[in-house]
Image: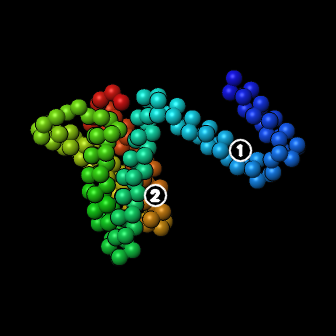
Amino acid sequence: TQLEDNELEDNELKNELKDNKLDSNELKDRKVLKNDSGLRNMAKSILDNPQMHHYALYLVFGVITTLVNLLIFKFLIDRGIHYTISTTIAFVVAVTVAFWTNRTWVFRSQSQGMKAIFREMTSFFSVRILTYFVDIIGLVIFIELVHMDEFISKIIINVVVVVLNYLLSRYVVFQAKA
C-alpha cells in the first residue's frame, strides 16, 4: 500500500542518514521531492475525476474572474471613483471574462451559432445582474451602515457572489452536464 511504501522510503532515508551516506540537506531535498510527487499525484487524481476536474476549473477561472473584478474595483476607487460606479465597471468586465471562460472551459457549452450563443450570453448576464444587486446592496450595507472599508467590503461580498454565480450558472444558464 501507499502507506507501507512511504514508511519503507522513510526508513531507507533514515538508514542512509545514520550511515553518513546522506547529509541532512540531502534528506530535506529528498523529502521535498517526495512531497512534490505527492502533490502531483493528488492533482492528477483530481484532474482525472470529471466532477473534481469541473470544480477545479470553476475554481481556477473563478479566481481569475474575481481578481479581475477586485483589481479593477481597487484601481477605480483608488482614483476617487465612487464605489457603486467602480463596482459597476468591474462587474461588466469581470462578467464578460466569466462568460467566456465558463462557457468554454467550465461548463463546456455545446451551443453553436450566434443566436444560441447570444441566448446563453443574455441568460448569463441576466443571472449575473441578480448577483450584481447582491454585490451593490452588500456594499451599501457594509460601507454605509457598518462603516467598513470599501475594499474589505468588496472582498467579503464577493464570497457570497461567487457561490451564487456558480449555482446560477450551473443550474440556470448552461444546464450542461459538467
Q: Position of residue 14 (x, y in %)?
A: 83, 40
Q: Position of residue 27 (x, y in %)?
A: 76, 47
**Amino acid type for the residue under numbered disc 1:** Lys
- According to the picture, the residue beneath numbered tag 2 turns out to be 155
Task: Tell me the residue at 26%/56% (across/down).
Answer: 92
Task: Tell me the residue at 51%/34% (across/down).
Answer: 44
Q: Of residues 8 and 73, which is closer to you in this image?
A: 8
Task: Tell me the residue at 40%/60% (across/down).
Answer: 70
In the rendered image, is residue 172 in sight? no
Estimate how packed mark 2 is, as few (under 14), some (14 to 19) or many (20 or more) residues with alpha carbons within 10 Å: some
- According to the picture, the residue beneath numbered tag 1 turns out to be 31
Residue furthest to the front:
21
**Sequence order check: which comes first, mark 2 or mark 1?**
1
Q: Position of residue 137 (x, y in %)?
A: 36, 56
Find residue 111 and report its image quarter.
top left
State the quadrant of the N terminus: top right
Q: Of residues 56 and 119, which is closer to you in this image?
A: 56
Element on which disc 1 rests: helix
State the quadrant of the C terminus: top left
Separation of disc 2 and disc 1 at Cα? 37 Å
Q: Position of residue 9 (x, y in %)?
A: 75, 34
Residue furthest to the top:
1
